[in-house]
Amino acid sequence: MRLRLMAIDFYFDFASPYGFIAAMQMPALTRPVRWHPFLLGAIYKAVAQSPLEHPLKRDYVINVDAPRTARRIGLELKMPQGFPEHSLPPARAFYWIEQRDPEAAVAFAEDVYRKYWLQGRSTADIEVVVDSAVAIGFARDAVLVGMQSRETKERLAAENEAALQRRVFGSPFFIVEGEPFWGSEQIPFLNAAG
Amino acid sequence: MRLRLMAIDFYFDFASPYGFIAAMQMPALTRPVRWHPFLLGAIYKAVAQSPLEHPLKRDYVINVDAPRTARRIGLELKMPQGFPEHSLPPARAFYWIEQRDPEAAVAFAEDVYRKYWLQGRSTADIEVVVDSAVAIGFARDAVLVGMQSRETKERLAAENEAALQRRVFGSPFFIVEGEPFWGSEQIPFLNAAG
């Protein structure tokens, strides 16, 4: 019984198309999922490179494979305005909300993710984040203040650091009982891992 | 009928574990496959980066994901001695053999690929290549001379250039009726592509 209850740690960047594609499939998993938004840029900064390092790879991901992979699960992708931009607002807001209501944080993550990748809203736009937080019951001013609080900033920094310590280098990235999985195509293997 | 007969262009580097994993699955495809060994290093040289750009990603690929992916299709991976080394000898030998006997070239590719990734032989070792060519009926001296001929070197250079022109940036990489697919996890989608 113990094995089946072990949680899946789900690492993702809100600015990652495959992170979005993975997020939409998390409800279908039988194991509990712990959501960990992080900033992929912080991981790659350490080695002075980019996750879309080759221009040909970048073009393939954006124009061919991410839209095609989304279509395979019935989603029509729309690139976020200004892509690629940072995703600091949703990552901070997630952890501020999670401190108050963990389930609401997941609902928030799913909602902003859809706005970025189905409606093409900017991942750097604070208004998108505030709208989603307000829609699930938080006060606009409280969200704005909370996102900028030292506690929230430190929490996100700690999560980025923890991701690096756990050897996370991409989005989506999963860890199940210590076993790492990178990429949305690994989702079918997560339930049985460990 | 025309669609079902369209060939799959299969690009791979002999020094690529996922290229090997893909090669072992090519016989199961219903479409004809055209094999194109190329040097991934030549593609990345243009942008002064590496396909295993992040040390964490490199470690994950080599120590976790490539062996695990191979195991899912019943293969026990053994890293080639000295990995990563270049794969100039098998790429050149492939095209020299292909000029003489296209079917023999595929048999040769499968044979050396197994020696690199199941027996751990070095991809830069000329002896491995010669042994495989001799085993399918070519004369040792003819292979050694043929691999160093201007014609063979120019053919491989032309194949590398053609791969870049067709926007190939990884191994394995497939093109079916103009549609690109990167990665061995795309193999289930190749028969129906186009």
Image (cartoon, coloured by chain):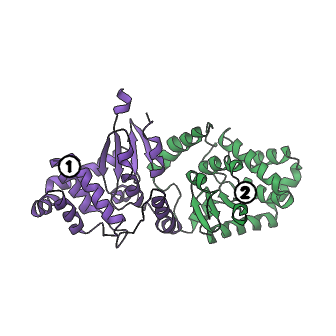
Chain colours: A green, B purple
Q: How many marks?
A: 2
**Outermost residue, front side:** A1
Question: Which is closer to the viewer, label 1 or label 2?
Answer: 1
In the rendered image, residue A30, in percent from the top left (x then y), is placed at 70, 53
Q: Which residue is mark 2?
A: A91
| Kind of residue at badge 1 | Glu
In the rendered image, residue A108, in percent from the top left (x then y), is placed at 78, 49
Q: Secondary structure at mark 2?
A: helix
Q: What separation in Å lies between label 1 and label 2 (alpha carbons)? A: 53 Å
In the rendered image, residue A134, in percent from the top left (x then y), is placed at 85, 46
Chain letter of disc 1? B
Q: Determine which of the numbered discs, if any, sits on residue B168 in the image.
A: none
Q: Which residue is mark 1?
A: B98
| Kind of residue at badge 2 | Ala
Are there few (<14), some (14-19), or many (20+) residues within 10 Å of tag 2?
Answer: many
* Quadrant of image for the N terminus of chain B: top left
In the rendered image, residue A131, in percent from the top left (x then y), is placed at 81, 44
Please determine whether, in this image, residue B179 is positioned above or below residue B80.
above
The residue under the point 36% across, 57% down is: B40
**Outermost residue, top side:** B1
| B80 left or right, relative to A5 | left
